[in-house]
Structure formats: structure tokens, C-alpha cells
Image: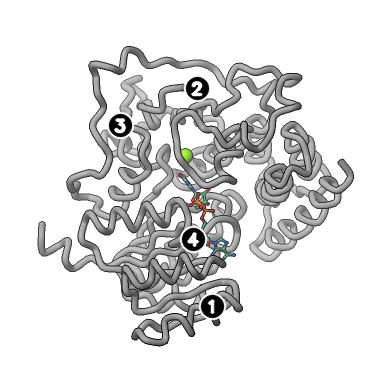
Amino acid sequence: MADDRIQKRIAVLGATGSIGTQTLSVADSLGTPTDVLTAGSRDREFEAICRKYSPRIAAMADESAARRLKTALADTDIKVYGGSEGVAAAAGEADADCAVVAISGMAASEPMMNAARCCRRICMANKEAIVAAGGHLLAAIKAGGAELIPVDSEHSAIFQSLTAGRRGDVLKLILTASGGPFYGKKRCELEKLTAADALAHPTWSMGPKITVDSATLMNKGFEVIEAMHLFSVPPEKIEVVVHRESIIHSMVEFRDHAIIAQLGLPDMRTAIQYAITYPTREDGCAGSVDWGTLSRLTFGKPDTESFPLLALAYEAARRGGTCPAVMSAADEVAVGAFLRGEIGFTDIFDIVESAVDRVGRPGEADLCEIVAADGEARVRAGEMCRGR
Ligand code: NAD
Ligand code: MG
């Protein structure tokens, strides 16, 4: 086991984010060296990370941040690349067993496809690119020769639960949802809520965009589409159950109605570590569930009337084409505007629904059409945000 650990090297794409920094803490605990690290724009923070982990290559999407980083790291052997092409090139030059894809948004697409050609495994945290263009990206990863292991906690739970039976015997996938901080509220109560309210997630500690997506249930909608692509299951075989305690991370029901679940404390490091060490298991970073203090596990149906984006995601999954990409892009713009205090919480619902109706095209779509629809949705969503 020790030899296996020493041989593994990782690339962390999106090393300064919530998943990226938790991946580095898992790497610390496993004693895994890093080969490539990438980040978006925060060069001071990234410099400290590079000094601590001494990657062979470091890349930043922001060109001027990359220039500052290059000067700051002049006393080291670290090669520094800049711009989106630099991030994609760094991913494509990784000499690593695993690439953890923790870049948020569509920007993850090219780096993840490049990493799939040089890394044995893609540990996939990114969801927006998978929602928008899952079929194409998964095919490209497969063609690149890499295996894909999910990092999102629900999908990691399903991946683990699926080992209990044959794929052909799966009846349905059951995704659990915490319900977010506004669970139980009616639509009229949601109107006055602020970014600070939305950022107070009851169980998970995550980046701001995904935390707001959890509050709107958009995140669960994305996860339905993510599950559809990752496990080749149609949306009607994916059920969402509200489970406030976030102890059951998701489940698989087989044809004999046996349900297999994966449980644990809500800590992303468990799923990140499993994606890196699979099929072996190593000592975990999260604690054990304390069955003495955990008095009950509760379950309920999601309220899709007050939180319409979950139902919209099912509809976008059924329509296909560019609809999921438009939904994801419009959501990214609307959530950004909400976090800056420019629009209200329920405006996010209206803007995303309207963008899917006006810009989304059902049926089949190639990658170029998806990228074009993503751009158009951003423009339309931006206009709608300014019109509020
Ligand atoms: P984050 O915003 O905290 O971090 C994003 C990372 O990507 C940062 O390192 C940032 O510098 C980098 N980045 C952003 N834009 C970039 C660009 N254009 N080019 C290159 N790098 C760029 O986000 P996060 O919460 O860590 O989430 C990362 C991804 O994982 C998202 O797709 C999210 O949906 C998914 N995810 C997150 C969690 C979680 O617990 N945070 C759980 C499941 C899935
Ligand atoms: Mg999740």
C-alpha cells in the first residue's frame, strides 16, 4: 500500500477553490505529490500554494496574475504558464496518475479533455461543463484513454453503491438533497432573502456559487443531469429525496428493491480521497458518524413549486440539445448578480426559466452549438439582470 501511495502523483485543476484546497489537504494526508497546479486569478494565494507543494508546472487563467506569479516564483524551478491556453496546456502536460478537475464552469472543458490524454484518471468535481456538454465531454475523456471517477458527494455515493449489483439490474438512482437553508419556505417568503442568508448552508461548506445553487435547488437539478451522463440513466429513473441531515449521500435501488446507500459525515474530503485512491481505501480525513448523538434521519419530497429550478432541470434533461447548457449559463450569470446584490433571490428562478425558454434548442447539439448557446444565454441573462 505504501508503495502505491508514493507512486501516485496528482494534478489539481482549480487548486485555489473550495474543492481544490480540500484536494490539497487530502494530498497532504495521503503523502501524494503534485505535478501540475492551476488557478484562475488570485496570484498571492496561489503563490503560497505553489511554494508549499512545489509543482513542476503552475498555470493561471488570468494573464496579468500569471505574469506576477512568474516573477514571484523566479527563485524556484516551477514553470509558469498564463491565460486559458496556459491552463489547458498545463493540464495536457501533466505527468500524473489523477487529475482532479475542480475548475468551476465551462472553463473546465478544455483542461479536462487535455488531462484525459495524459492522466490515467479524471477525478471529476466540475459539474457545469458536464451539465452543458456531458455526452461530448465524457466521450472525449474516454477517447483520451482516462477513467472517470466522480467527486460530487452524491455521485461518489452512487458510484460506490453501484458496486453492489449489475448495471442492468438498477431500478433507479436516489439523489439526496439537504434542501438548503430555505427548506420549508414558500415562494413569497423567498423574495426578500439576501446573499448572506443564502450562503449560510446548513450542512456543507462549499464555494459561494454552488452554495446559492443549493439554496435554489438548481444544484440538485444539475446533479440529476450529471447523474444521467455519468451513469447512463434516463432522468425518469433518477429520484430526488430531501434528507436534511446530509448523512446518506445518495442511494441505488436495484430491481429486487434492495437499496444500497453510502453514508458518512458531510465532508467533501471523503469523496475526493475515494476518487484518488479507488479501488483502495486509506485512512480518512473526516471523522466518524457519532451514532449516539445522531438521533434520526429524515426524508421528504422536494417542493418544486416554491423551488422551480429542480423541475426545470428535469425538463431541460428531457428536451436535451442546448437546453441544459443554457440553463447552466443563465444560472451562472443570475447567481453572480444575486451575490453582488443586483437582483433578488427569486429573480434567479425567472431569469433561468426565461433563458431556457427563449434560447434553448431541444434535440441534438454539437459542441460548437453548445458553446454558442452558452454565450447567447449569458448575454440574455445579463440583459434580464440589468432589467430588474
Ligand atoms: P470555487 O469557486 O471555490 O473554485 C473554483 C476554482 O476554479 C478556483 O481555483 C478558481 O481559481 C478556478 N477557476 C475559476 N475560473 C477559472 C477559469 N476561467 N480558468 C481556470 N480556472 C478557473 O469552486 P468550488 O466550490 O471548488 O467548485 C469547483 C467545481 O466543483 C464546480 O464545478 C462545483 O460545482 C463542483 N463541486 C463543488 C463542491 C463543493 O463542495 N465546493 C461539491 C461538488 C461539486
Ligand atoms: Mg453534490
The number of numbered discs placed on residues in the rendered structure image is 4
Give the farthest residue toward the top: 295
Q: Are marks 1 and 4 in contact (CB under 8 Å)?
A: no
How is the rendered protein coloured?
Answer: one colour
Observer-side mark, 2 or 4, equals: 2
The residue singled out by tag 1 in the image is: 66
SS assignment at label 2: strand
- Of mark 1 and mark 3, the one earlier in the sequence is 1
CA–CA distance between discs 3 and 2? 16 Å
CA–CA distance between discs 1 and 4? 31 Å
Give the farthest residue toward the right: 387
In this rendering, position of residue 126 left or right of residue 293:
right
Q: Residues within 10 Å of mark 1 (few under 14, many from 20)?
A: many
The residue singled out by tag 2 in the image is: 242
Q: Is residue 163 above or below residue 63?
A: above
Question: Which of the pair 278/136 is nearer the observer?
Answer: 278
Q: Are marks 2 and 4 in contact (CB under 8 Å)?
A: no
Quadrant (top left/top right/bottom left/bottom right) for the C terminus: top right
- Of mark 1 and mark 4, the one earlier in the sequence is 1
CA–CA distance between discs 2 and 4? 32 Å
CA–CA distance between discs 1 and 3? 39 Å
The residue singled out by tag 4 in the image is: 139
The residue singled out by tag 3 in the image is: 264
- Give the residue at x 52% y 47%: 207
- Give the residue at x 55% y 56%: 104
Observer-side mark, 2 or 1, equals: 1
Q: Is residue 381 above or below residue 68?
A: above
